[in-house]
Image (spheres, rainbow, N blue to C red):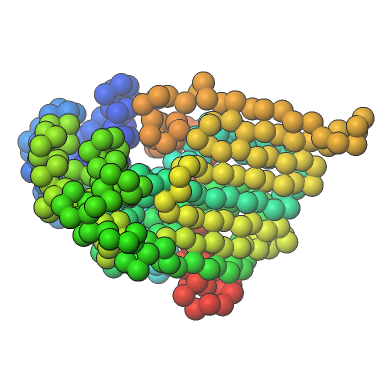
Amino acid sequence: MKQVKVIIVGNGDRANCYCKLALTAPELLKVAAIVDPSERKLAEGAQRYGVPPDHCFTSVDECIRYHERHGRIADGVLNCTMDELHYETAIPFLQKGYHMLLEKPVVNNRAQLLDIQRTAEENGCLLMVCHVLRYTPFFRAIKEILLRGEIGEIIHMESSENVGVAHASNSYIRGKWNSAEKCGSSMLLAKCCHDLDLLCWLNNGTEPERVASFGGRDFLVPEKAPEGAGKRCLVDCPLADSCMYSAKSIYVLNDRFPWYSWDCIDKDYREITKEEKIESLKTFNPHGLCAYGTGSDIVDHQTLILRFKNGSTAAHTMIQGTVIPRRLMRIVGTRGEIEGSIETSKFTLYKYDFETAGYTAREIDVAAQVAESDNHAGGDDGIIRDFVSMINGGETSVSCTKIQDSILGHTCVYAADASMVKQEEIKI
Ligand SMILES: NC(=O)c1ccc[n+]([C@@H]2O[C@H](COP(=O)([O-])OP(=O)(O)OC[C@H]3O[C@@H](n4cnc5c(N)ncnc54)[C@H](O)[C@@H]3O)[C@@H](O)[C@H]2O)c1
């Protein structure tokens, strides 16, 4: 396989995850250029991947102008910008014929989604969307069982995304996805475009047809704050030692998801002192605010039901702030059932038992296939390797998230959100 050269567009947390491959398998992946308006992120990336100064750009325009003067810089682009920038940062590179690995959610509306697909197709670009969960050993093993027909035809699927307290706090209550107005994504789009993608992919002998959804921001609101709660946990809250959303527990004592919590301090999070962290929580850091009064405009719970063209159905639920963080999946087929939680990397396959007229249960454990350093249960490494293989014209895996195949999940999300707002069933 030949080495694939890429331009990182948005050298943040996600770019870091995918580009571990450039450090561990440089024969497969090379970072040829970086685009990021942050001088610090540019300098960090240039040093980590050995990118020369003339290939470090502070804007997409600057990079495109370099391409126009000097010719092609790389084979593809890793577009790891924030949600609201995907469209404007993707189109110029697709128009120049760069293949692309594009972070999810692609965009928040159907017109731009189709425009991205069309631009990629017209310019001969291979475009993959970062639905990393498809690449986890857990979901791959489930997909393979379905493809072998072991549980027959799918009748119904149930999934749920239980966003644990610390993750919810870091990303959706106090973090950078806490406002659809600011980041462009609803909660369902930001978090569960993965789940809707999985439901469509697992059931891809058919297509989703109708959806209905309910949800709202009903619990993480000022009126539901515990009595006597203050505005900032470490400043004026008498409940700082007991509240489950206390900044003291999540950020000071346990430092959960530090790459998110200290983002507002313009420094590598590994170099920030405890004193600087506490001072920020007491003053300007949004993670220091009372969880019930962050001004977030996204739902804290949402549920939906989905009907596919062949009559099969699915239900999905998202809940923010659960005590146990977990993604559950249950699939009922005409000849068996599958049930498991990705966090354990184990699931159970149930089959009818002729001898007893009961059932057999076989546990399938894929934990050994998950690299410890992978934040997505093995998905990040799998997707970047598939991208390299796709550009090389090689075989892609059963998980491959080509744009043509990633559109359905997004359109289900748009329809579910519309259903929730309009309070009516929507045709997808
Ligand atoms: N696949 C997944 O499971 C998964 C998980 C988490 C996040 N995401 C998605 O990945 C994307 C990136 O998230 P992140 O946490 O890495 O963000 P980040 O904030 O860590 O990184 C974004 C980077 O983009 C840079 N940037 C800002 N404006 C830019 C511009 N105009 N051109 C180029 N770069 C620009 C920022 O300086 C920053 O370095 C988001 O869309 C997010 O929703 C996906």
Quadrant showing the N terminus = top left
Quadrant showing the C terminus = bottom right
The residue positioned 14% from the left and 42% from the top of the image is 278
Residue 281 can be seen in this image: yes
Q: Position of residue 372 (x, y in %)?
A: 40, 24
Going by the image, does 201 lie left or right of 334? left
Q: Is residue 410 above or below residue 102?
A: below
Q: Position of residue 230 (x, y in %)?
A: 22, 59
Numbered-mark total: 0
The residue positioned 32% from the left and 22% from the top of the image is 25
Which is more toward the observer, 64 or 300?
300
Q: Position of residue 357 (x, y in %)?
A: 90, 36
Q: Is residue 49 above or below residue 78?
A: above
Residue 88 falls in image quadrant: bottom left
Going by the image, does 362 lie left or right of 250? right
Q: Position of residue 129 (x, y in %)?
A: 41, 48
Which is more toward the observer, 284 or 424?
284
The residue positioned 56% from the left and 77% from the top of the image is 424
Residue 257 falls in image quadrant: top left
Going by the image, does 358 lie left or right of 17? right
